[in-house]
Image (spheres, rainbow, N blue to C red):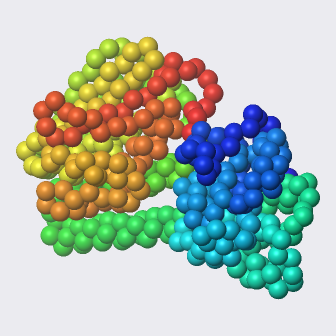
Amino acid sequence: MSCPQSNPRRPDRSGAGQGPAAPRSAETGRQTILIVEDEPEILAPLAHSLEIEGYRILTAEDGLTACRLIGTEEPDLILLDILLPDLDGWEVCRLLRQHPISRIATIPVIMLTALNSPGDKWRGLELGADHFLPKPYSIKEVSLTAANLICRRRHSVALENRVEQLTTRQDEQENLTHLLFHELRNQITILNGYSQLLNENGEIEVCKHAINRSSAYLHALAEEVLLIRQVEGGLLTLAPEPVVIKEVLEEMVRLYAQPAADRNMIIESAWQGETRPVVLNRPGVKIILSSLLDNAIKYGPPEQTVMVSGRQTDNLVELDVQDQGEVIPHQEQEQIFMPFYRSGGPTGRAPGTGLGLHGVRVLSRAMGGQVSLDEPSRGGNLFRVRLFGAERKEGDFAR
């Protein structure tokens, strides 16, 4: 496997004695090499040759300047002389390998020095140098060695990132499994309890209502978790179909009318604009509205009004769910969309899996849209879902 080198560009050198170094973000696609050398007649041809090959070059003539540039610029490779003013190359290498940030501590180092005894080489390798080239050296050899080390590091970093992603996903999966079993156990306990009560006392209406509520919760939870995990894992794209969004909104308002009434709440709804079918995913839209309504009822204070409204134009569907509950603190406004995060309401942390708002974000993005927490006109919290590209007639939605 090879690493393609960036295309040659006009030389652009920054470093000691040449003003502040250019930010790496301005050098997208170019690998950066820091040359630490105090002899200009050696530095100039080496820097020029590497610039011609497309590298961005930083230079330092002493060890202290080198340490500063390493911390601020995070070069992809360091060409390090040993006999330097202030801090010598041995000390620079030692400090580099002890850096608390891993991506800096692992920057490849090639030592270029007139000290060419076996003991000097062994000392350099012991301090963490990746390669040791004695002077006089071939600039071609320096270039090839640098390219190989940079390539190797890029592959290593990519592998580490992939391992970290897999580890994070595994942790999330374990958390999800734990939460699901916890929720399942709770709901089965409720079902069993009311079933026994029904047999013993015959309180049919109370027991029927509780059993239906738990059964509906389990069904909605299973449907939501399955859809979210499949979309996140790339196993499923949301199938487009003609959907009358106004009908879905009214259906979900009717479904949540009783849970709202249980807390002395009222759900009001309104619709503006067109009512023709649009190309979206019906289960995805239902889960989005279900999660937002459940969130508003669960976290809001009793005797409030939850307002659900929708608007439809040629290329945009907007769905708003506004409550009159306690305003979500600014520092939590991004966290609430993370998986398993549950905000504390007025009476403490509400029951649930912490997947609702995360699911809203995942499904909104899967249908080419977004969800935001906007500033409401009359207190409380306003969640707004925008689903773009509603005129698409065929093809899957992008993840």
Quadrant of image for the N terminus: bottom right
68 on left or right of 106: left
74 on left or right of 278: right
137 shown above or below 89? above
Residue 98 appears in the picture as rendered = yes
Which residue is depicted at the point 55% across and 45% down? 20
Q: Residue 88 lies in what quarter of the image?
A: bottom right
In front here: 103 or 254?
Answer: 103
381 shown above or below 269? below
Which residue is depicted at the point 30% across and 47% down? 333
Q: Residue 159 lies in what quarter of the image?
A: bottom right
How many numbered markers are drawn?
0
Residue 105 appears in the picture as rendered = no
Residue 57 point in image, percent of width and height = 70, 48
Farthest bottom residue in view: 119
In front here: 68 or 245?
Answer: 68
Which residue is depicted at the point 87% across and 81% down? 117
Residue 186 point in image, percent of width and height = 31, 69
